[in-house]
Image (cartoon, rainbow, N blue to C red):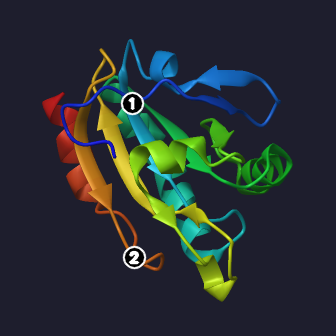
Amino acid sequence: MVEIGNAVPKISLVDTELKQVDLAEASKGKATILAFFPGAFTGVCTKELCTFRDSMEKFNSLNGRVYAISVDSPFANKGFKDHNGLNFPILSDYRKDAVKAFGIELNNFANLKGYTAAKRSVFIADSKGTIKYKWVSDDPTVEPRYGEIEEALKKI
């Protein structure tokens, strides 16, 4: 389980263009928001990621960037990204390596026995890839505390 003070785990995920992204390396150089979400094309996830989309100018001014991560396929993530005009990468954790490493498995998501998704979670890493902020919800209908994310980003 990833806690504040830990390094972002070295996990390889795939983006919507089917390119491998090393999460630990991608989290270096700038403050990085890692926004895990349960499922593309679901109501709360759409609202959350569109809120991040609309906040990118603010995040950029704070030298921050966003990576959204779900267990959905890169193909579903691409459709979701394109449909909503999202202006940051969405990474596919189809093997569920990241949700396991971060300790944020949401088992039996949507009452689908055996289906594991990501708990709605936000981690912020500093420019060295060290986790400085953590928020995890056991309830997939609860959105992150957007103001708290901005404040945490300002402190990095």
Left or right, residue 147 beside residue 76? left
SS label for mark 2: loop
- Measuring from the top left, give residue 124's x and y in whole percent: 32, 38
The single residue placed furthest to the left in the displayed view is 155
Residue 153 occupies quadrant: top left
Q: State yes or no: discs 1 and 2 in contact (Cβ < 8 Å).
A: no
Q: Which mark is residue 8?
A: none
The single residue placed furthest to the bottom in the displayed view is 111
Residue 14 occupies quadrant: top right
Q: Is 20 located above or below residue 1 in the figure?
A: above
Left or right, residue 15 beside residue 4? right
Circle 2 is placed at which residue position? 142
SS label for mark 1: strand
Circle 1 is placed at which residue position? 32
Q: Amino acid at mark 2?
A: Val
Label 1, label 2: how far apart the Cα atoms are: 22 Å
64 or 127: nearer the viewer: 127
Q: Is 19 located above or below residue 155 in the figure?
A: above
Q: Amino acid at mark 1?
A: Thr
- Measuring from the top left, give residue 6's x and y in whole percent: 25, 31
Residue at (71%, 56%) from the top-left corner?
Answer: 84
Mark nearer the N terminus (1 vs 2): 1
15 or 59: nearer the viewer: 15
Left or right, residue 21 beside residue 31? right
- Measuring from the top left, give residue 150's x and y in whole percent: 26, 45
- Measuring from the top left, give residue 13's x and y in whole percent: 65, 32
Residue at (82%, 54%) from the top-left corner?
Answer: 76
Q: Badge 1, how many Cα within 10 Å: few under 14, some, many 20+?
A: many
